[in-house]
Image (spheres, helix red, strand yellow):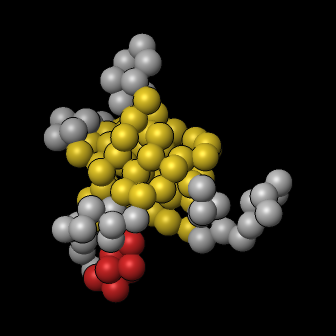
Amino acid sequence: MSITLKVDCYSGYKAEERPRRFSFPAAAKESGTARSADVLRGRTHEVREVLDQWYGLGYQCFKVRAEDNNIYILRHHTEQDSWTLDAFRREGPHEGTA
C-alpha cells in the first residue's frame, strides 16, 4: 500500500520532529488500494500518540495512534520531503475512551 499523505508536523529543535495530524488529499496517489483510498480521501486525523519511530536510509517512520483509535505507519521520505501511508490497522476502542 502506498498512499500519499499531507502531514502537519511539530517542529521543535529540528524540522519535521513528529506528526501532529495527517490527511488523505482528494487527489491521493495509491497503488493497488483504489477502494480503500476512495474511502480515506479528504479525511484528516489528529495524532493522539506516537507509539514508535525508526529511521532508514532516506526515510523516517512513525507508528501513530490517531483519534479514531486506529494505528497508522507514516513514512517521511526525507530527500523528497513527502509522506506516504505504509500500513494501517483497525483497532477497537482504546482504553480510557468512551
Q: Quadrant of the N terminus?
A: bottom left
Q: Is residue 90 above or below residue 18?
A: below
Residue at 78% across, 58% down: 97
Q: Is residue 84 above or below residue 53?
A: below
Which quarter of the figure has residue 81?
A: top left
Residue at 42% across, 14% down: 13
Looking at this view, name the residue that lies furthest to the right.
Answer: 96
Q: Is residue 35 above or below residue 44?
A: below
Residue at 83% across, 54% down: 96
Q: Position of residue 86 (x, y in %)?
A: 39, 59
Which quarter of the figure has residue 77?
A: top left
* Left or right: where 67 falls relative to 82: right
Is residue 41 visible in the rendered image? The answer is yes
Q: Position of residue 87 (x, y in %)?
A: 45, 63
Is residue 86 visible in the rendered image? The answer is no
Which quarter of the figure has residue 29?
A: bottom left
Q: Nearer the viewer, residue 54 or 91?
A: 91
